[in-house]
């Protein structure tokens, strides 16, 4: 089950599915999230995908991850990894406790990041790959591109030894 926590985002990806809405401030309430968890359980769903915008920007993101775990859900986080060091450390703790089982990283083309975003992305990717969670690098394609444009993904897999995928 996909659960859209917020449409807010801290990136401007050309492939964004919520691009026209990313600054509207809409976020899911805790009551609505609770309902989603109850609906998932009643439907025998055990895997949920937390997405956005950028789901980590939700002001109650940490609470929501813990609520999902308390409901017995296997959590997959879809993220751009552009969060602070404190959340990167929290993700490592959640991974060790199996609160977050998988992290799907929207890894945009390298030239699409500002220098500070690129440093943060690479730092968080390095930290995430030390976690037990399965890491998957992904990109949403909207148009054909030459294969050499995607070598950066292969380079990330090699550089960060992302082998659990």
Image: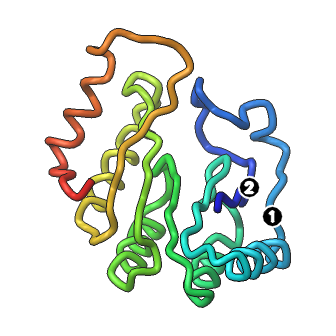
Residue 105 horizontal side relative to residue 34, left or right: left
Q: Residue at x 39, y 81 (%)?
A: 98
Q: Position of residue 110 (x, y in %)?
A: 37, 27
On-image quarter of the N terminus: bottom right
151 over 18 or under it: above or below: above
Q: Residue at x 62, y 87 (%)?
A: 71
27 over 87 or under it: above or below: above
Q: Which of 140 and 79 lies nearest the eye of the viewer?
A: 140
Residue 55 horizontal side relative to residue 109, left or right: right
Q: Position of residue 45 (x, y in %)?
A: 62, 73
Q: Residues within 10 Å of mark 2 (few under 14, many from 20)?
A: many
Q: Residue at x 62, y 55 (%)?
A: 51
Q: Are marks 2 and 1 in contact (CB under 8 Å)?
A: yes
**What residue did someone put label 2 on?**
6
Q: Which of 14 and 147 lies nearest the eye of the viewer?
A: 147
Q: Which of 120 and 162 lies nearest the eye of the viewer?
A: 162
**What residue did someone put label 1 on?**
28
Query: How many angstroms separate mark 2 from mark 1 (CA)?
Result: 6 Å
115 over 88 or under it: above or below: above
Q: Position of residue 155 (x, y in %)?
A: 19, 33
Question: Secondary structure under badge 2?
Answer: strand
What's the coloring here? rainbow
Q: Position of residue 16 (x, y in %)?
A: 63, 32
């Amino acid at each position: 089950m996909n659960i859209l926590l917020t449409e807010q985002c801290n990136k401007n990806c050309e492939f964004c599915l919520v691009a026209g809405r990313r600054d509207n401030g809409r976020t899911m309430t805790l009551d609505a999230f609770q309902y989603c968890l109850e609906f998932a359980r009643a439907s025998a769903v055990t895997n949920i995908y937390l997405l956005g915008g950028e789901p980590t920007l939700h002001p109650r993101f940490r609470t929501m991850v813990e609520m999902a775990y308390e409901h017995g859900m296997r959590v997959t986080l879809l993220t751009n990894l552009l969060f602070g060091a404190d959340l990167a450390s929290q993700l490592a703790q959640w991974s060790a406790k199996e609160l977050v089982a998988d992290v799907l990283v929207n890894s945009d083309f390298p030239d699409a990041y500002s220098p500070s975003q690129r440093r943060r992305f690479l730092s968080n990717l390095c930290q995430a790959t030390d976690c037990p969670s399965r890491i998957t690098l992904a990109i949403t394609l909207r148009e054909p591109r030459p294969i050499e444009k995607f070598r950066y993904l292969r380079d990330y897999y090699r550089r960060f030894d992302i082998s659990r995928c």
